[in-house]
Amino acid sequence: MMGFELLERPQTEGLSARIHALVRGLVTNMNRSTYSPVTTRSLANKVGEGKRLDSLIAEWNTDSLSDPDRVILEFALKATRSTYKITEKDAQEFRDNGLNDEVYVDVLNTVAIQTSHDRLANCLGISADSLPILTSQEAAQ
């Protein structure tokens, strides 16, 4: 249960709830997980300014994102797809875009925990969640 608590909201002030939710959504989509999309979608919808999760995911590579947000999302994709390619250069890119090491670790933890949950559920054949884990009040915090 602690893993879910860590996924409820960003663990640092430097990572917005919107980008945190988008990181979770991207990771879940990349992992082709059927376990937590309802929860992830619900969280993204609450912090996504009325945009659907699909729209939020589609916009990660458009000009509508700030450079720091783009760095976060590109790193999340890299950490999900090919962790072995992560180098000090990735951490430096965070710093070069005004993000501190705490945000870097927060994103890395979010990716690792979400991926772990997704892959475990996929391997065990756990059916999709029917209700969001977070209430709207919890997601707003």
Image: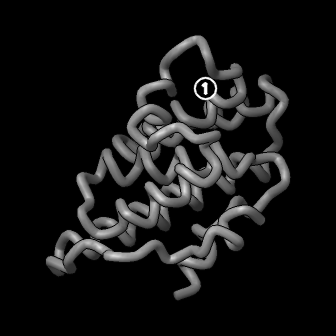
Q: In the drawing, does residue 15 fall left or right of residue 48? A: right
Spot occupied by residue 79 in the image (x, y as percentages of width and height)? 46, 45
Q: Residue at x 33, y 66 (%)?
A: 118
Image height of 14 relative to 35, above or below: above
Which residue position is annotated with label 1?
Answer: 70
Q: Nearer the viewer, residue 71 or 22?
A: 22
Q: In the drawing, does residue 72 fall left or right of residue 117? A: right
Q: Residue at x 17, y 73 (%)?
A: 123
Spot occupied by residue 4 in the image (x, y as percentages of width and height)? 53, 77
Q: Quadrant of residue 137?
A: bottom right
Numbered disc 1: secondary structure = helix
Q: Residue at x 20, y 77 (%)?
A: 127
Q: Quadrant of the C terminus?
A: bottom right
**What colour scheme does the image use?**
one colour
Disc 1 marks a residue whose amino acid type is Arg
Kindly give the residue lying farthest to the front in the view shown.
50
Q: Quadrant of residue 131?
A: bottom left
Q: Residues within 10 Å of mark 1 (few under 14, many from 20)?
A: some
Q: Nearer the viewer, residue 102 or 2?
A: 2
Kindly give the residue lying farthest to the top in the view shown.
63
Image height of 53 relative to 105, above or below: above
Q: Quadrant of residue 77?
A: top left
Q: Residue at x 79, y 53 (%)?
A: 102
Spot occupied by residue 2 in the image (x, y as percentages of width and height)? 58, 85
Q: Nearer the viewer, residue 61 or 46?
A: 46
Image height of 122 relative to 59, above or below: below
Q: In the drawing, does residue 1 fall left or right of residue 48? A: left
